[in-house]
Amino acid sequence: MNIDPVKALGDKVERLRKDLGTLTARLDDVETAGAQQQLSATNQIRDNNRRLTGTNNRVSELAESVHRLERLLVALNRKVRAGVAERADFDDWPGIDQTLVDTILAGQDAYARKTFTPQEAQDTRKLIARYDARLAEAIDAAEGLTNLPANAESLWRAKYARWQAFGKLGRRPPAPDDEAHAGDAAARSQGNEAVAEARRQIRERIEDAVARDLLFPAWFENALGPAAPPGCADDWLCTATDVVLYRLLHGVDSPADALGPAPREQGHRRTLHDRLVGECAEYRRA
């Protein structure tokens, strides 16, 4: 049987061309279907995100509404109780006079000052002695520089180097003041006793107000809530005591803000203010 190889090859190429066309068409159909599915999925994701955002906004609105309702209920409760309940007085403290307050503040200042342990005082005195010796050498070198003959170059360099070395020592260390140290120790001790006495008086009055179900001042409830959270009574009382003491020590008399604005300067008062603000916020959320 005589078969033309060229014609047979052409037929095979033609069949392959048709198969390639069919495969290309199928691939185009698959790509089109995939693009449509991806577009559909993207649109669905966008719809879900919009619904989620709307839900989150709604939850936030509901939370704000609940919070406003809680404040209204607290205010209403205060008005109802004000007509029948005795008010607690956390602003007037005859037993905590200005002398006691000054003793507490003096103790806090003493704690804030730098104090030396016996070993630190000994080491500092050694540093001061070395500094004074180097100072005497530098003064001697400076005086020698003005009296050296013109040909004493090496000696001039040595004295000048000694003077320059002294200039790199910096300032003279402050000397430990034993008398001031003893005074600060006494101030800290007296301050601790005064703080304990003030806290005792304040805590007793708060506990009495809780036991008698008295109406707390507005600034007290704004800071600490209307009552101690369950399981936190002792911690709540400690914070409440420190809040009242803070007002007494730093002259805060706002009828609404228990602690007043935060102090600008860093130190014990700023640290205490920030701690009390954080603790009060935890009790209000509980």
Image: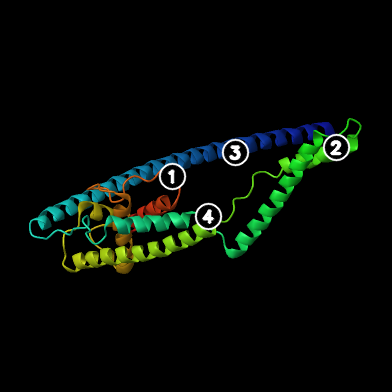
Residue placed under numbered mark 3 in the picture = 26
Residue 157: numbered disc: 2
Determine the CA span between mark 1 and mark 4. Answer: 18 Å
Residue placed under numbered mark 4 in the picture = 114
- Whole-percent x and y of residue 132? 69, 49
Left/right of residue 154 with respect to residue 107 in the rendered view = right
Mark nearest the camera among 1 and 4 is 4
- Whole-percent x and y of residue 100? 31, 59
Mark 4 surroundings: few (<14), some (14-19) or many (≥20) residues within 10 A? few
- Whole-percent x and y of residue 245? 31, 57
Q: Give the image quarter of residue 153.
A: top right
Q: Does residue 240 lie above or below 26 as drawn? A: below
Determine the CA span between mark 1 and mark 2. Answer: 49 Å
Which amino acid lies under the numbered mark 3 shown in the image of this protein?
A: Arg
Counting residues from the N terminus, which is met first, the one under dot 1 or under dot 2? 2
Counting residues from the N terminus, which is met first, the one under dot 2 or under dot 3? 3
Tag 2's secondary structure? helix
Q: Give the image quarter of residue 81.
A: bottom left
